[in-house]
Amino acid sequence: MRRISLTEAHRRLSILLSKLGEGPITLTRRGKPVAVLLATEEYERLHRLEISLRFQKTQDRLARLNADVPEDELAADIRSARQSITDGYLEQLRGSLKGGNALETLMREREWERSRDG
């Protein structure tokens, strides 16, 4: 991962932004890492991964808590948890993105998931 000082990053921000496709850039202050610049696509991929992991943990917890609950009720609980997590993610994106293809794509994916899950 490329490292650059905050002072240098401030002077060359537009150049750095154009190079984000080559990978993340670590920003340093007095030689110590303080932040990382990521391409938007990479940030969104990492955020989707985080949501997926949270969903899996919720699903596992529900399965343990509801071991004696009929399968159809458990499936409904899992669908509900998944919808809540996904809806929360989309709300976060709405706040951080002003339109654009990424949000439209996620909205289409969400609608497809809802139609698939019934």
Image (spheres, helix red, strand yellow):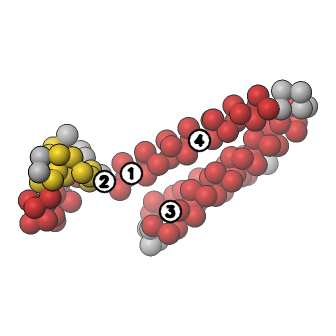
Task: Report if residue 81 is visible in the image.
Answer: yes
Toward the viewer: 118 or 60? 60
Nearest-to-viewer mark from 4 and 2: 4
Residue at the location (83% across, 36% down)? 74
Per the image, the residue denoted by label 4 is 54
Packing grade of label 1 (10 A; few <14, some 14-19, many >=20) is few
Which of marks 3 and 1 precedes in the sequence? Answer: 1
Residue type of the residue flagged with mark 4: Arg
The part of the image, by quadrant, that contains residue 61 is top right
Residue 41, image x, y percentages: 37, 52
Packing grade of label 4 (10 A; few <14, some 14-19, many >=20) is some
Residue 42, image x, y percentages: 36, 48
Per the image, the residue denoted by label 3 is 93
Per the image, the residue denoted by label 2 is 39
Q: Is residue 57 above or below residue 46?
A: above
Residue 43 disc label: 1
Residue at the location (70% across, 52% down)? 83
Q: At numbered mark 4, what does the secondary structure look like: helix, strand or loop? A: helix
Which of marks 2 and 4 precedes in the sequence? Answer: 2
